């Protein structure tokens, strides 16, 4: 008989990169837009600057979501902090800066919100980034509140985070279902498996729950997709469409 699932303290609906498409992703402005739509949990992507500052950026390059071009890897934080991360989205957000992860963490603490930090390392920086994220959360997050869920596609990053603080909840991200994916998540000590929405079916949900893993899905932007996943017994949905889904309902 499978072990019962541990209590899950997080909201069902998670705002992807702050507010998905309604504001410039991975910025404080996006988090505020998501909050204005009633969302209480936010996903963001964390990388290390060349001088060791954790900041928010999804891509390997700066081209898509800032005014700069080229790779972000190796750039000092003082330089990155001056890049415009909002005008690409719209004039309304011109001048919006790249935030540090510490800024987002402190904002979530002050607003009594929940956080899912995706460890999104530059190539070759998996261990350092995993360690740095776990150290920051361990130092800043109130012990009495549910800690941020740390997720990554990179097992090395999750293993490094676990070495720093074995009590932090981890989630393994996957974009393809493998026969050993549940074993990998279990070996890493994960609390959740976070898979692309198309990968989940009833058998996969049951198998994950039997391993005491919560089942989360990314990135769900259509009602039909959400209803199918809810019917499967999914434990959380990450969405860009904070304007489409009511975070107080399923």
Image (spheres, rainbow, N blue to C red):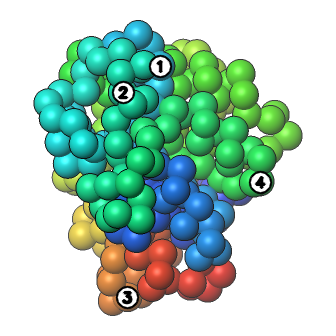
Residue that badge 4 annotates: 112
How many badges with numbers are in the image?
Answer: 4
* Left or right, residue 139 beside residue 229: right
Q: Are marks 1 and 2 in contact (CB under 8 Å)?
A: yes
Disc 2 on helix, strand or loop? helix
166 w.r.t. 164: above or below: below
Locate residue 183, reporting x and y percent: 36, 39
Sequence order check: which comes first, mark 3 or mark 2?
2
Q: Residue furthest right?
A: 144
Q: Around disc 4, counting alpha carbons within 10 Å, would you say few (fewer than 14), some (14 to 19), or many (20 or more)?
A: few
Looking at the figure, which quarter contains the N terminus? bottom right
- Residue sitting at x 44%, y 13%: 52
Locate residue 83, reporting x and y percent: 34, 35
The image's mark for residue 70 is: none
- Residue sitting at x 42%, y 19%: 78
Q: Residue furthest top?
A: 51
Sequence order check: which comes first, mark 4 or mark 2?
2
Q: Nearer the viewer, residue 144 or 110?
A: 110
Sequence order check: which comes first, mark 4 or mark 3?
4
Q: Can residue 135 be seen from the camera position used here?
A: yes
Sequence order check: which comes first, mark 4 or mark 1?
1
Sequence order check: which comes first, mark 1 or mark 2?
1
Viewer-side label of 3, 2: 2
**Real-space Cα distance between discs 4 and 2?**
28 Å
- Residue sitting at x 36%, y 27%: 80
Locate residue 180, reporting x and y percent: 27, 41
Residue that badge 3 annotates: 223
Locate residue 209, reporting x and y percent: 50, 59
71 w.r.t. 27: above or below: above
**Real-space Cα distance between discs 4 and 1?**
24 Å
Residue that badge 1 annotates: 53
Residue that badge 2 annotates: 80
């Amino acid at each position: 008989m499978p072990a019962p699932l541990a209590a899950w303290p997080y909201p069902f609906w998670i705002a992807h990169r702050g507010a998905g498409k309604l504001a410039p992703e991975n910025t404080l402005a996006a988090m505020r837009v998501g909050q204005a739509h009633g969302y209480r949990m936010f996903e963001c992507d964390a990388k290390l600057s060349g001088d060791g500052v954790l900041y928010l950026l999804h891509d390997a390059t700066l081209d898509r979501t800032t005014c700069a071009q080229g790779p972000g890897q190796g750039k000092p934080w003082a330089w990155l902090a001056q890049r415009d991360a909002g005008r690409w989205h719209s004039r309304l957000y011109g001048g919006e800066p790249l935030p540090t992860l510490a800024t987002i963490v402190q904002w979530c603490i002050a607003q009594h919100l929940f956080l899912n930090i995706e460890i999104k390392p530059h190539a070759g920086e998996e261990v350092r980034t995993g360690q740095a994220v776990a150290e920051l959360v361990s130092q800043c997050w109130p012990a009495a509140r549910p800690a941020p869920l740390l997720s990554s596609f990179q097992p090395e990053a999750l293993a490094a985070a676990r070495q720093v603080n074995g009590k932090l909840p981890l989630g393994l991200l996957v974009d393809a279902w493998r026969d050993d994916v549940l074993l990998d998540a279990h070996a890493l000590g994960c609390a959740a498996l976070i898979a692309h929405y198309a990968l989940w079916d009833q058998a996969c949900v049951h198998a994950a729950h039997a391993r005491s893993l919560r089942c989360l899905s990314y990135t769900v932007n259509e009602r039909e997709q959400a209803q199918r996943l809810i019917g499967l017994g999914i434990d959380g949905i990450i969405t860009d469409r904070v304007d489409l889904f009511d975070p107080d309902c399923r």
